[in-house]
Image (cartoon, rainbow, N blue to C red):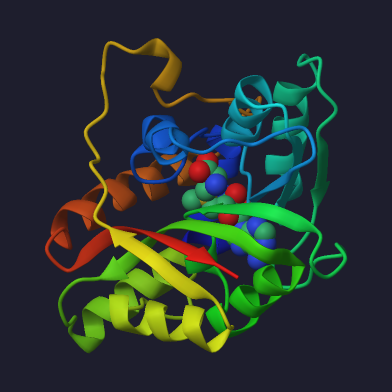
Amino acid sequence: MCLGKTYLDCLAAFGIGGAHPGGLQLTKNLLANERFDENMVVLDAGCGTGQTAAYLSKEFDCQVLAVDLNPLMVEKARERLVNLQKDICIEVADVQSLSYEEGSIDVILSESVISFTNLTISIPELTRVLKNNGKLFAIEMVLEQPLSADGRKEITEFYGMDQIWSVNEWMRAFLAAGLTIESIEVPELETDIDDIETATDFSLSESIDETFHDILNRHVVLTENYKDQLGVRIFKCTK
Ligand SMILES: C[S@@+](CC[C@H](N)C(=O)[O-])C[C@H]1O[C@@H](n2cnc3c(N)ncnc32)[C@H](O)[C@@H]1O
């Protein structure tokens, strides 16, 4: 990776909100039929700049928790959330090792986060903190078609991922953690370019290294080059 800077460092420097495929619009669609009351605890796992956490706290009465491994992301999420009247508990934490008690969370959202972790550690850990009958919603990258060894290396090195998982491999990981898979959907990724509320938002750092522009450009190129091999699924699981 260019000068030791990673793709995730780049997202943090630009402070890209809704940094998952489909952005906030897909989050809204995903949650459209959910009902969260004030007794429920919802965790935005890998919250980035907190766009989804802010949406959750504005739309629902539930208690919102948010964690991210990247301190700059958490700082930018705090800046976003400080103006909301709600009490949102946000902290730097690794979804592979959470401080929450077992069975303490009703709903967990992972919006393009588990893909960046070791699935065999993060999925069991997220399952541990979920209540019985709790839900895990994950919007994640999947391998649609076999990739050459070089292609796999290029993608995993660029995004800093251990692996790229096929839908079957994701399913095996959820089932191995004791979750039930309720549905697997191919999301509608079209966004409404006239809708300011769901447009990608940025919380730029004061100075942005030129390297980060290169990384963002490379992301765009890779997305285009591998559009047939890489896809997205929404996994809805219950414990
Ligand atoms: C593609 S971004 C998505 C951010 C956010 N969910 C969103 O949709 O805007 C991936 C995020 O996962 C976070 N992340 C990666 N590995 C993590 C881990 N082990 N624990 C917590 N957060 C992690 C990164 O810091 C980054 O903010």
Q: Position of residue 221 (x, y in %)?
A: 22, 51
Residue 238 can be seen in this image:
yes
- Establish if 205 lies above or below 133: above
Q: Position of residue 24 (x, y in %)?
A: 44, 31
In-image side of 99 versus 237 (left or right) = right
The front one of 15 and 196 is 196
Q: Position of residue 212 (x, y in %)?
A: 48, 44
In-image side of 163 versus 221 (left or right) = right
The front one of 180 and 224 is 180
The residue positioned 49% from the left and 78% from the top of the image is 174
Residue 10 can be seen in this image:
no
In-image side of 64 versus 133 (left or right) = right
Residue 21's quadrant in the figure?
Answer: top left
The front one of 48 and 171 is 171
- Establish if 155 lies above or below 146: above
Q: Position of residue 79 (x, y in %)?
A: 75, 24
- Establish if 177 lies above or below 130: below
- Establish if 16 lies above or below 154: above
Total residue callouts: 0
Residue 108's quadrant in the figure?
Answer: bottom right
The residue positioned 53% from the left and 88% from the top of the image is 176
